[in-house]
Image (cartoon, rainbow, N blue to C red):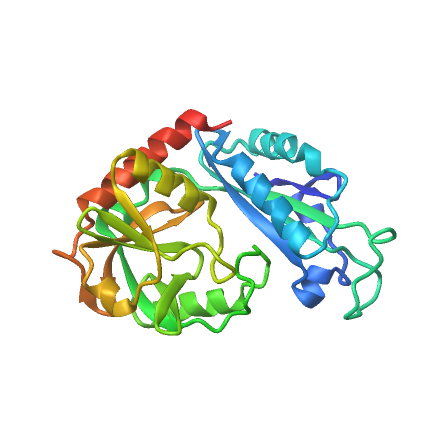
């Protein structure tokens, strides 16, 4: 079945959708995005994603598109027409297509933002085999720009990081800056020592994960202590458990870091419980 996508106010078959070659995202990576998960035909954490999207637009001084207040309706319509039971909705907003290439931002009064949304069908999204066997992680140097808190489409280095991990026989990479873990290539990173979750504090150095916020809230409600501070790869290797969070992976256990197994090399009980709590509570709140 050909997907229906949304481009600048229109619902179109994917093979008819077009964006200008002068679009700022294509030429300058000048755009932001969000990915919202769908479980049981409903959107997970939509309000959080919409709030972060607005913040990203403000940080880059990209004006809100005319359809901004209709994004929930557009998400729901794409889920409906594409018959998505479990999957993802990808949303991208760029500074637009001014008609030529220039480093200077175009006049927002004459250049409208480009808005694109599409769905990805992922049957059994919450039942990923990786949640049962765990992920293997390698560490790489973090050489990204300094505003990782803005969810931009500048994803070349994270993509390269995933390829470095793949070549090393691992599933993903954690990035390291000044000796401390920042985050994964497309996820936030955590370790567990005893009854304490340790994860880097929010700053410009990491993405302010929507799933991160929910998981830490649920952890505190479950009487699990949380420390938001820097940690090293060596500290991670010595942890009892480790995991990542993201909108599409939810809570995913990490069982190996740079070839060193954590615990007995299988997903830990606390991580499994956090995943269970997150999925249960998110399904209840889905819209």
Q: Is residue 270 left or right of residue 205?
A: left
Q: Is residue 96 left or right of residue 154?
A: right
Left or right placement of residue 5 versus residue 265 in this view: right
Identify the image quadrant of the N terminus: top right
Q: Residue at x 41, y 46 (%)?
A: 212
In this view of the protein, which residue sits in the foreground, 227 or 78?
227
Quarter residue 271 falls in: top left
Q: Position of residue 245 (x, y in %)?
A: 38, 49
* Residue 35 percent location from the top left of the image: 53, 46
Residue 78 or residue 248, whichever sits in front: 248
> Vertical placement of 189 versus 163: above or below?
above
- Inspect this view and state whether residue 91 appears: no
Q: Is residue 18 left or right of residue 118?
A: right
Residue 231 position, x and y percent, is 31, 63
Question: Height in image: 108 above or below 81?
Answer: below
Residue 23 quadrant:
bottom right
**Rendered residue at 28%/68% (across/down):** 233
Exactly how many numbered labels are in the figure? 0
Look at 47% across and 59% down and name the residue there. 206
């Amino acid at each position: 079945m050909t997907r229906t996508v949304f481009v600048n106010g229109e619902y179109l078959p994917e093979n008819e959708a077009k964006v200008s070659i002068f679009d700022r995202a294509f030429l300058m990576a000048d755009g932001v995005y969000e990915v919202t998960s769908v479980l049981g035909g409903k959107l997970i954490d939509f309000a959080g994603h919409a709030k972060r999207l607005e913040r990203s637009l403000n940080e880059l001084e990209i004006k809100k598109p005319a359809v901004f207040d209709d994004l929930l309706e557009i998400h729901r319509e794409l889920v409906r027409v594409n018959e998505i039971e479990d999957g993802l909705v990808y949303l991208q907003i760029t500074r637009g297509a001014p008609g030529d290439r220039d480093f200077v931002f175009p006049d927002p009064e004459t250049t409208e933002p480009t808005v694109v949304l599409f769905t990805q069908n992922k049957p059994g999204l919450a039942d990923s085999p990786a949640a049962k066997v765990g992920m293997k992680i390698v560490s790489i140097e973090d050489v990204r720009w300094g505003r990782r808190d803005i969810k931009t489409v500048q994803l070349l280095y994270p993509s390269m990081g995933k390829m470095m991990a793949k070549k090393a026989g691992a599933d993903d990479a954690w990035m390291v800056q000044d000796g401390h873990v920042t985050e994964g290539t497309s996820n936030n990173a955590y370790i567990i020592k005893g009854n304490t979750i340790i994860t880097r504090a929010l700053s410009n150095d990491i993405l302010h994960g929507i799933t991160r916020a929910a998981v830490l809230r649920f952890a505190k409600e479950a009487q699990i202590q949380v420390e938001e501070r820097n940690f090293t790869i060596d500290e991670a290797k010595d942890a009892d458990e480790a995991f990542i969070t993201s909108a599409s992976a939810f809570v995913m256990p990490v069982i190996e870091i740079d070839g060193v197994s954590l615990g007995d090399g299988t997903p830990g009980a606390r991580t499994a419980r956090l995943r269970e709590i997150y999925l249960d509570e998110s399904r209840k709140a889905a819209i």
